[in-house]
Amino acid sequence: MRTTTTTILLVSIYVAMTYAHLCLIYPPQRGGFNAASLNTPASKDCFLITEPCGGKTEGRQEWIVPPGGRDMVVTFQKNENHWTSEYPGTFNISVSIEGGEFMPIYSFEDTNTPALSLYTYSIPESYWNPWVLRFAVMQVAYYAPSINVTFYQCADLSLI
């Protein structure tokens, strides 16, 4: 009986550890997601761990038209929480222009927010303006050191 209980406990811990997730809501993530995924912790649409874009190949370009002189908003969701005080983790937003290297835009430490928490970051117009009329890939990554995994999402953009 003890072996069965231990096995169930270990499997439960493994499942909990492997299902941290990140969903990119806006701009839309490659491959999209089922709307129900955003209301479901540990959604498979948000479990992508292959660098740089979760294993998703280039998708449909989203033509983004940020209002002149305004920030471009990025919205993403921590679909599952793996924060610990010892290993809090980080969120990183990067961009690649015309197939170049990913350049960091913004990074911040994870906090003990619950699963399904939304985050919004505004990219200042002065930063995104040079991307206009160029192809860009935006990457959002969630590094969860408590389980030593990074989750990736990308969006394909063309700014006009």
Image: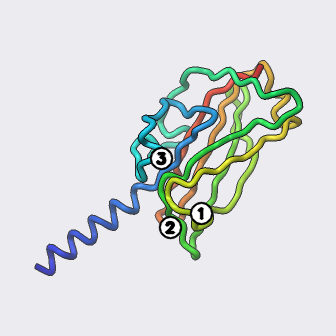
The residue where tag 3 is placed is 49
Q: Which residue corresponds to the image point at 58% horizontal and 32% vertical from the top-left?
A: 28
Amino acid at pointer 1 = Gly
Could you tell which of marks 1 and 3 lies nearer the N-terminus?
A: 3
Figure check: 80 above or below 22: below
Disc 2 + disc 1, Cβ < 8 Å: yes
Relative horizontal placement of residue 115, taking residue 106 as reference (left or right): left
Relative horizontal placement of residue 116, taking residue 110 as reference (left or right): left
Could you tell which of marks 3 and 2 lies nearer the N-terminus?
A: 3
Measuring from the top left, give residue 77's x and y in whole percent.
56, 48
Measuring from the top left, give residue 70's x and y in whole percent.
84, 34
Of residue 89 and residue 118, the one placed in the foreground of this image is 118
Relative horizontal placement of residue 52, taking residue 19 as reference (left or right): right
Relative horizontal placement of residue 77, taking residue 100 as reference (left or right): left
Of residue 95 and residue 19, the one placed in the foreground of this image is 19
Disc on res. 110:
none
Q: Mark 1 Cα within 10 Å, few/some/many (few <14, many 20+)? A: many
Name the image quarter holding residue 129: top right
- Tag 1's secondary structure? loop
Taking the image as drawn, is residue 22 in sight? yes
Figure check: 82 above or below 50: below
Pick out the residue farthest to the bottom: 2
The residue where tag 2 is placed is 146
- Tag 3's secondary structure? loop
Of residue 20 and residue 145, the one placed in the foreground of this image is 20
Amino acid at pointer 3 = Ile
Q: Quadrant of the C terminus?
A: top right
Q: Mark 3 Cα within 10 Å, few/some/many (few <14, many 20+)? A: many
The residue where tag 1 is placed is 89
Measuring from the top left, give residue 147's x and y in whole percent.
47, 64
